[in-house]
Image (cartoon, rainbow, N blue to C red):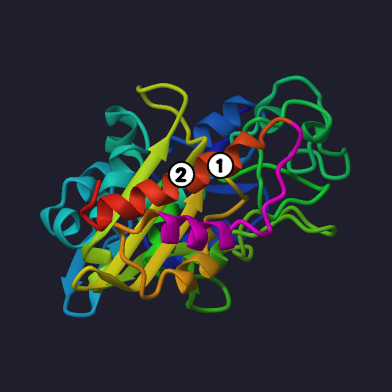
Amino acid sequence: MQSFAYERAATLAQAIGAAAEPDTAVIAGGTELLNWMKDGITAPRRLVDLNGLSGLDGVAIDDRGLRIGALARMSDLAEHPAIRRDWPAISQALLQSASAQIRTMASIGGNLMQRTRCPYFRAEVDLPCNRRRPGSGCAALAGEDRSAAIFGWTEQCVATHPSDVAVALAALDAVVHVDGPGGPRAIPVTEFHRLPDHGSVRETVLEPGELITAIEVPASAAARRSHYLKLRERASYEFALVSVAVGLDLDGAVIRKARIALGGVAAKPWRLRETEAALQGVTPADEPALRRAVDAGFAEARPLRRNGFKVELAKRAVIRALQIVGGVA
């Protein structure tokens, strides 16, 4: 890790101005950024601390929904009584996101800004990785691809996004509020992270100097009846092989509206829109109907050589989560 200058922003305007400068990074909890710096992924010459900014660490709830400040700590949000009651998938995703020590430090905004855990991106040796060394190629295409994407990948990159809570937020139609040199704007969580294309491997839609200020999640019947299910290779903390967030609006025992997002399968949380539409009028107890609806959402899945198991694993996870939320599991 190289030496760097440190300053503490006193105002949001000061933070935005600093963040727009080259070789500058902002820091909140630091649980992700410091790892990047230690691994040589990034080497900023200046760090700007956001923790002195007032009004960005609170939680506000009204009839319209939930507003979370970007600096709110994951541990506080996971244990918040109203979030556990009215947005349970968010609480569940946060509790499965990291160790208790990391959750105590990590901010919700920083969690959305995580970078991929692809071993080629994190490797200390000089391996092809377009995200780390643009134009060098994607080593996972011919190498270890077990944890790679099954949706939305290109030859530029097959990595997945690691955030758990982003999956729950995407399923519940959350919006990210940002501010920057061009002024404030609102971005749906489903549009916040970018899929790789043939001209860019940028991971988010943020422009230089833009910072997350808050996340809003609408109140809804589907949010109150929601669940987050994470499948990983060990019981202790680990990144997801596959995860799913489900929210259901039920009319008695019949699904009126479904909200479903997958994690561990793409460079962003992946909404299963076709499955959501096919589930209207279905009962969670009708497993064959659930299977047909879920199959519809996987028509565009493109597994690689060693991760084809993710397709069936994800399908079963979705069905299981639907049954849990529907009260039949």
> Which image quadrant is residue 123 in?
top right
Q: Residue at x 52, y 55 (%)?
A: 269
User: Circle 2 — which element?
Assistant: helix
Mark 2 neighbour density, 10 Å: few (under 14) some (14–19) many (20 or more):
some
CB within 8 Å, label 2 to label 1: yes
User: Circle 1 — which element?
Assistant: helix
72 relative position to 163: left or right: left
Reading the image, the residue beneath label 2 is 316
Start and end of the magenta stretch?
Answer: 288-305
Kind of residue sitting beneath label 2: Arg
Gap between marks 2 and 1, in whole Å? 6 Å
Position of the N terminus by quadrant: top right
> Which image quadrant is residue 137 in?
top right
Residue closest to the eye, 38 or 287: 287
Which label number is shown at residue 11? Answer: none
Q: Residue at x 37, y 51 (%)?
A: 108
